[in-house]
Amino acid sequence: MRMVGTIAVGIVALLASPARAELPVVKEARVSWQGCAYSIKVREDVDPDYPYPRPLYRISVQSEVVSPGTCSLTPRTVELTTSKIEPRIAIAANAEGLAVAYFHGEYVRFMGDWARIGIHRLDPSTLGSVRVAGLQASYVPEDGGAGGPGATYLNELTLHPGYLEVSGTFSENSVTEYPPPMPWPYPIVQGNRFVAIYPDFFGSTQKPPHLVTF
C-alpha cells in the first residue's frame, strides 16, 4: 500500500473562526486516552457555492484536558474535511495510538451518492494526521470500459492489537484503496459489505490492507 498522505497540522485547517466553532454539532463520537478526551464532530454549515441553500458538513477533531495530572496537551480543534452528504464518524484509541474514520462526499444527479471513507492516524498532542488511508467504490463494466463512481459507507472502526479494522457497505461492484494502487479497470467484487484490515496501522512500515467483500 502506498501512503495516501502525511498531513501536518499546518496543512489542515484549524477552526480558529469563532463563527465556525459555534456551528451546531449534529454528530459526535468521543474517547478518553491517557487523561485526555478526544472527539470527532460533525458541524452543519451552509454550502455557499450552490444556487440554493443546502447543508455543508464540516468534520473536525478536538482534544480536551480531563485530568491535568496525566494530560499535558494544549486543547486543539482541527478540521479534517467537508461533506455535502451527512457523514458517519468513528473514533478509537488503544495502547498503540489514536485513530478516526468517516465517510464523506456528495450527491451526484442521476448517479446517487459519491462517497469515500477516510481513515486517519492522529498525533494525540497536535491532532496532526500522521497517516491517512482511504477506500472508494466504483462501477466497473464487465468489458473493462468506462465506468463511474460509487459510494462506501462507514459502519465501524475497531482497533485490535496489531491491526485496525474498518467495516461498512458499498454500492456498485468494486472497492479499492483511495487513491487506487492499480490502473483502471479495478477488480470486480461480489456483495455489498466489506471489511478492511490494516496490519500494523501504527507502525512505521505502510502495509496494504486485507480487503474482503461479501
Image: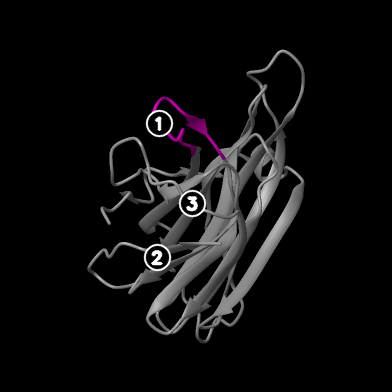
The kind of residue on which mark 1 rests is Asp
Relative image position of residue 76 (x, y in whole percent): 52, 58
- The magenta segment is 139-150
The kind of residue on which mark 3 rests is Gly
Q: Which quarter of the rendered picture does the C terminus lie within?
A: bottom right
Q: Earlier in the sequence, mark 3 or mark 2?
A: 3
Residue 123 — which label?
2
Residue 118 — which label?
3
Above or below, 180 relative to 213: above
Above or below, 50 relative to 108: above
Secondary structure predominantly adopted by residues drawn in magenta: loop
Q: Earlier in the sequence, mark 2 or mark 1?
A: 2
Q: Residues within 10 Å of mark 2 (few under 14, many from 20)?
A: some
Q: Are marks 3 and 1 in contact (CB under 8 Å)?
A: no
The kind of residue on which mark 2 rests is Asp
Above or below, 119 relative to 136: below
Q: Residues within 10 Å of mark 1 (few under 14, many from 20)?
A: few
Q: Residue at x 35, y 36 (%)?
A: 185
**Separation of marks 3 and 2 at Cα, in angstroms:** 16 Å
Q: Where does label 1 land, which residue?
A: 143
Residue 23 falls left or right of residue 177: right
Relative image position of residue 177 (x, y in whole percent): 39, 50
Q: Residue at x 66, y 53 (%)?
A: 88
In depth, the one of 39 and 126 nearer the eye is 39
Query: Of circles 3 and 2, which is in front?
Result: 3
Q: Earlier in the sequence, mark 3 or mark 1?
A: 3
Relative image position of residue 109 (x, y in whole percent): 67, 22
